[in-house]
Amino acid sequence: MIKDYINSLKLIYIACGFNRVWLLYISIILALILSVFEAFFIGIVYSIFSSFLEQGNKLSLLPLSSYFSDKAELQNFLLLLAIIVVFFVAIIKIVNLKLSAYLYAYINTIVSSHIFNKTLYSNLNFHQKNNSSSLIAIIVEKSKSVGEITFFILGIIKSTIMLICITTVAIFLSSKSFLIYFFLILFIFLILYKIIKSRLKSLGKIVASENVKIIQSLQESYSNIVIIIVHNMEKFFNEKFKRSIYNLRKSQGDIVFISGIPYVIINFFLLGSVLILVYFLKDTSFLYIPILATWLLAMQKLFPSFNEIFSNLGTLKSLRQNFNDTKSLLLNDDLHEKRLVHTDEKIQFNEKIQFKNVDFKYENSNDFVLKNINLTIKKNSITGIVGQTGVGKSSLINLIVGFFSPSSGSIMSDLSEINDENVYSWQKKISIVPQSIMLLDDSIENNIAFNELKDKKKLDICIKAVCLEGLVNEFNQKKNNLIGENGKRISGGQRQRIGIARALYRDTNILILDESFNSLDDKTKKIIMDNLKKLNKTIIIVTHLKKDLMICDSVLFIENKQISEIN
């Protein structure tokens, strides 16, 4: 299991560009140094007890004993040495803890941000195939499993090193019987792990599943709050959320409970065995004090190591589903970065956009949405697109923008075909106002410009072009000039005008307006349309209202998968 995790972590580190693997090795080296110091400390304690009890049979073997003629001087030196070792052990532990905390935070940050970045730069087809709740759950919650698994595997390696060092010293200082004792503890540990590992794995799957359901439930609730209030659906959504959050918390609690059981059992065995040992040696316990002290100290060091190994192995089982989901998304072939990689090839737009014998159907569908489309949109013309709901207006826009490639045929800009190699360059020439305007809980100006280094003159021109001066002045005079989450402090028409102003501020030649006037009053609409007509841009208007087509040079009518030009 650990080998599989390590191989998977290597792939994830490479994919995310994690170039600080050397810090993991430093952490292991520090653990090795710490283990040596801990083992050395046990040897010092044994020597101190032997010295005080005048049992120097082992002590005489130490090279340092020949440098001291006086026993009191040797005892003082050993006590001082013990204090120094304890000090260095504390320093190394603090450094290692800090390093582990840094690695945990750094790894989780680069994994989450890398996945988020890749999803942002993926094509529209990827987002249509993946549930946004699942993506959010992986980015926010499940991706933490990469850092956690790294941390837990490091913990297992460090604890194993500690076990080897402490056990070796204990056997050397006491007897081979400690080795039997060690393997007995290991046997109990393996039996307990075998019993609970499948349960931890199944609980991990529940945690992964319920995380997605909770995010989905919250998204659905808050995005439909108006319907919930009007239709009195509070109880339904609350019960749905309560079921998921209960299953999640109960599973997390069960993982903690089951992982803690071995600690109690092994602790009982360790303490019980010591008491039994003391009972059988009670008549000669004075003679065995150095050995008993060594055993007690060794077990005091071994017990946390055993527990950490066991606990970490159990947690690794429970994290498997989260880790697999993160790995699957991160290494997903559909998660492309084409717009990042292919930025050198440019495409020109000086004359026209042309569709040549274009057929289009969505992936995994047998039905064509558009069939044998041939059309031309001249540069700096205003083109309207009309048709009944569901006939393919949005599909046509998606093809023009380059969100999808045609199933057959070609889409041209002048003499160049729009493809994966130049779509990034092509999309830099386009501004779009979608039906649903995305808004930040920020000022109107920041919702338009999306940039702290705003061009104030250009911003004012765009605000004026869409009749937003009054609204901007009104909000700027308020102490709180934010428009609210998803623009809940403004009207639908004001949302649309912010969307149009944002597209104008981008200042591209191609402007696509998808049902962008249906919330505007006639007077405001006319002013904005007149302003748009003066811009000398290639404007494409998708609408179902005939009066919105008055400024168009040509109108494309979609029906029965075909497109015809109408007056």
Image (spheres, rainbow, N blue to C red):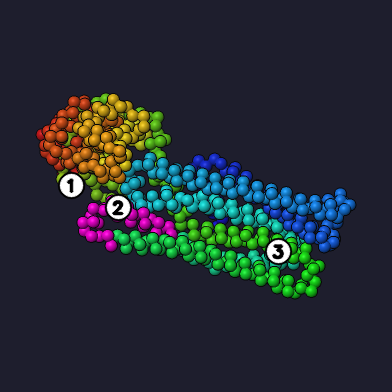
| C-alpha distance separating marks 3 and 1 | 79 Å
Mark 1 falls on what kind of element?
loop
Q: Does the magenta-highlighted stretch encompass residue 210?
A: yes
Q: Position of residue 561 (x, y in %)?
A: 19, 44
Q: Amino acid at mark 1?
A: Thr
Of the numbered discs in the image, which one, if any, rests on residue 225?
A: none
- Magenta residues (range): 207-235
Q: Main secondary structure of the magenta part?
A: helix
Task: Give the mark, 1 or 2, whose residue is nearer the N terminus.
Answer: 2
In front here: 25 or 60? 60
Density class for disc 2 (Cα within 10 Å; few <14, some 14-19, many ≥20) is few
Marks 2/3 in contact by CB < 8 Å: the verdict is no
Density class for disc 3 (Cα within 10 Å; few <14, some 14-19, many ≥20) is some
Q: Position of residue 218 (x, y in %)?
A: 33, 54
Of the numbered discs in the image, which one, if any, rests on residue 296?
A: 3
Quadrant including the N terminus: bottom right
Q: Nearer the viewer, mark 3 or mark 1?
A: 3
In front here: 521 or 129? 521
In this figure, which residue is indicated by the disc labeled 2? 222
Q: Residue farthest to the right? A: 69
Question: In this rendering, is residue 63 above or below 297?
Answer: above
| C-alpha distance separating marks 2 and 3 | 58 Å
Residue 354 shown left or right of residue 77 in the figure: left
Density class for disc 1 (Cα within 10 Å; few <14, some 14-19, many ≥20) is few
Mark 3 falls on what kind of element?
helix
Q: Does the magenta-highlighted stretch encompass residue 144?
A: no
Q: Position of residue 94 (x, y in %)?
A: 61, 48
In front here: 69 or 151? 69
Q: Amino acid at mark 2?
A: Tyr
Marks 3/1 in contact by CB < 8 Å: the verdict is no
In this figure, which residue is indicated by the disc labeled 1? 389
